[in-house]
Amino acid sequence: MAKQFDHLSDVLTRFIEAQHIFFVGTAATEGKVNISPKGMDSLRVLGPNRIAWRNLTGSGNETAGHLAQINRMTLMWCGFEAKPMILRTYGSARTLHPRDADFAELNALFPPSDAARQIYDLAIDIVQTSCGYAVPFMDYAGDRDVLKKWAEDKGPDGIAAYWETRNRQTIDGAPTHILDPQEG
């Protein structure tokens, strides 16, 4: 049975910190709904109603484009290894780009990476748990280093060029504001 809370408890925070993967969901008023798996060392619980996660450069940039239109986000974790549970946080998020004043402070919470594209500062409205009884057991074998190596090979100039050609719009053609806060 699902239970709702107005904040993350210490128990739920420890659950989040023990997970190796989470999922982010966003949607604009029209177009595709986006659900993305996230891993690596990219998430910090900053308080009972605040989470920051750093988005590294990737093939799409849907979250930024969706949040520019409708500021709502859901994060979800599943207990794959031990306790069967699904945890969701619902809220609104500030999108911070490297050009923004608060970006450096939050980015310092994570390991250095030239691939850091945005940080999402989520203000949690509702926390929900559910049973997760149908979630399979899965063993964690380790993080992949492919994205880290890709970013190192590209370097800052190559990543900026990638943003220009691959990350300026969502798959529905909405601006992501990756390079210019006024674009679109």
Image (cartoon, rainbow, N blue to C red):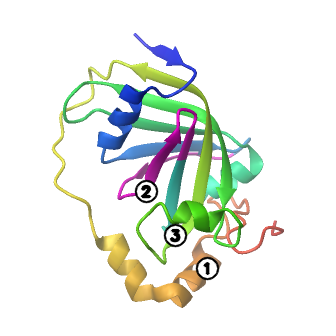
Kind of residue indicated by mark 2: Ser
Kind of residue indicated by mark 3: Ala
What residue is rendered at 70% in x and 61% in y?
173
Disc 2 or 3, which lies upstream in sequence? 2
Please tell me which residue lies in front, 38 or 120: 120
Q: Residues within 10 Å of mark 2 (few under 14, many from 20)?
A: many
Disc 2 or 1, which lies upstream in sequence? 2
Q: Quadrant of the C terminus?
A: bottom right
What residue is rendered at 37% in x and 58% in y?
41
Contact flag, marks 3 and 1 (Cβ < 8 Å): no
Q: Would you name the residue on which mark 3 appears?
A: 116
Q: Would you name the residue on which mark 2 appears?
A: 42
Q: Identify the secondary structure beneath mark 1.
A: helix
Please tell me which residue lies in front, 46 or 162: 46
Q: Is residue 30 left or right of residue 110?
A: right
Q: Residues within 10 Å of mark 1 (few under 14, many from 20)?
A: few
Q: Position of residue 93 (x, y in %)?
A: 65, 45
Name the chief secondary structure element in magenta: strand
Q: CA distance from mark 3 to mark 1?
A: 17 Å
Q: Check residue 165 in the rendering and tell me which mark sits there, or answer none.
A: 1
